[in-house]
Image: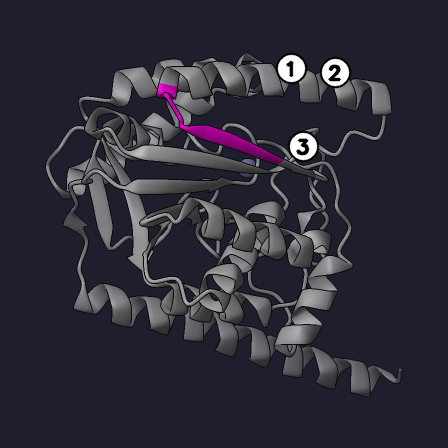
Amino acid sequence: MPPLLQALQRRVEHAIRRHTARRMLVALKRATHRLPSTLHVPVRSRVLVIAPHTDDEVIPCGGTLLQHRQLGSQTRVVFATDSTAGLADADLARRLQRLRRDESEQVANAMQFESVVRLDLPDGRLVRYETTLEKQLVDQILSFQPDIIYCPFPGDGHADHQACALAVGDAAVQLDWKGRMHAYEVWTALWPNIMIDISEQAAEKEDLIRMYASQMADRDYAAGVLGLNRYRGLQHRVRYAEAFYACDAREFQALTNLLNQLAPSSHTAGEHTPQVNAPLSGRSEQAGRKARSAAPAGNTPHP
Ligand SMILES: [Zn+2]
């Protein structure tokens, strides 16, 4: 392509990128302006947690799920991937999968989850399985009939987390599901409209995260997320809080559609850095999904 055309293409892509990112921010601003962050108190409910990887059920929302345990809520956790960190060595991947499965069973027992479902889709390549994931999440919503779904925020900075958000948004709208989505934060701080005071659960949450010893050996996620929870708590003058973006299924899907207009990053994440699909070149929704699907998987870290 002639240099002039290349320069023109870059300018157009940059303009679309800015426009799309702006639309997402405007949508969030409107929603959070109408509903400024409030302290929310969970009530006994049927709770479905969509976790891309084992440990995503405790790091972003473990304190809240402990409150649900206390309330007698029935909680089902769906792990989307096999949590093998995209390891190429099949033997190593199997061993890691077994180890993380054991760790997550220990956590599930402590949390008294009613059920745990493992979809075992490929870790780090979920974006290529969004349609499969969507169908399986439709089945999960139909069979469990949740009142609340906890799932990753659409803009969370990890490709598997974004793929989960897209799939669950489509599944919920397809079913005309009337419950509440509570989107959580893992790799990217979101723009919250509700927070849950987890001061009384913070110590147990830390213990639960540390049950994932295989992950803690690499990085201290427990200390990291409790720092975030402490910071979130400042807004409401409580010691620790978990932050969420709460909305109905249609609003959630509208946010995921904005995300889906974004093409993949040209930046390939290193082995030990999150694979970020942050706002990049703009495309149509279908092209965006195709383009993200074609993005190199790389080794994704956890959570
Ligand atoms: Zn994760």
Give the structural element (helix, strand or loop) at label 2. Answer: helix
Q: Is residue 123 above or below residue 132?
A: above
Q: Which residue is mark 1?
A: 99
Instruction: Say whether marks 2 and 1 touch (CB < 8 Å).
Output: yes
How many numbered marks appear? 3
* Amino acid type of the residue that numbered disc 1 sits on in the rendered structure: Leu
Q: CA distance from mark 2 to mark 1?
A: 6 Å
Q: Find residue 185 and report its horizontal and vertical position in percent.
A: 40, 44
Q: Residues within 10 Å of mark 1 (few under 14, many from 20)?
A: some
Name the residue that disc number 3 marks.
Answer: 82
State yes or no: residue 116 in magenta: yes
Q: Hey, which residue is sitting farthest left in the picture?
A: 237
Circles 3, 1 touching at the beta carbon (< 8 Å): no
Q: Is residue 33 left or right of residue 78?
A: left
Q: Please provide the residue range marked out in magenta.
A: 111-118
Query: Which residue corresponds to mark 2?
Result: 95
Point out the residue furthest to the front here: 143
Which quadrant holds residue 45? top left
On the image, the x and y values in percent for residue 254 come to: 44, 71
